[in-house]
Amino acid sequence: MATQRVPWMRETEVFTSGAEGYHMYAIPSLAITPDGTILAFCEGRKHGPTDHQEVWLVLRRSTDNGVTWGDLQLLYGNNGGESWSDLIELDDLPEPICQASIVRFTDETSHDKNRIVFDMLNSATRENLTLRVNYDECKTWATSKVLYTGPAAYSDMAVAPDMTLCYL
């Protein structure tokens, strides 16, 4: 994949298709722990790209703000999914073609203003990954920037303790 260099952005490949016994990795997600550890999750698809095959939930950790990443870990649960919360439907956001991500970047009590960041594809062909910023608690999305013009899908974001916007 061709990389577009942006001065304020660092790109690190966290999951590599064909590596570590997996045909490909899909549907990523990010979380940041209270101590600042970045957790990058995704599906590890063992034998091909389809949904209906051997698929495992895998994880990598970074304790240095995404500069380096630990070994691939296999995750599994044992409580039948009881730890998930109820879903809340948000009808006012632009419709993503496939998984999008939304995070609160700042709030007006601890920063100068409210900022909510939303990423989505800006085309019906899974291209033009676009970052949108909102300043009015999700009422409008007037500010946007295309982060990547090539093919993209299934993204996620998180905010690190130093206010770095982490993107997977």
Image (cartoon, rainbow, N blue to C red):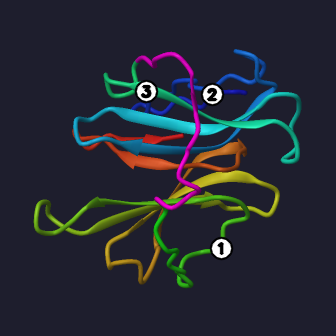
x then y, percent, for residue 108? 16, 69
x then y, percent, for residue 28? 60, 43
The residue furthest front is 79
Q: Amino acid at mark 2?
A: Thr
Q: Quadrant of the N terminus?
A: top right
Quadrant in the picture for residue 139: bottom left
Q: Amino acid at mark 3?
A: Arg
Is residue 133 a member of the stretch shown in magenta? no
Q: CA–CA distance between discs 1 and 2? A: 26 Å
SS state under label 1: loop
Question: Is residue 132 toward the left or the right of residue 163 in the image?
Answer: right
Residue at position x 41%, y 78% from top? Answer: 138
Q: Which residue is mark 2?
A: 3
Disc ID at residue 61: 3
Range of magenta residues = 68-83
Q: Which residue is mark 1?
A: 95
> Compared with residue 107, is residue 22 higher up or lower down, i.e. above or below?
above
SS state under label 3: strand
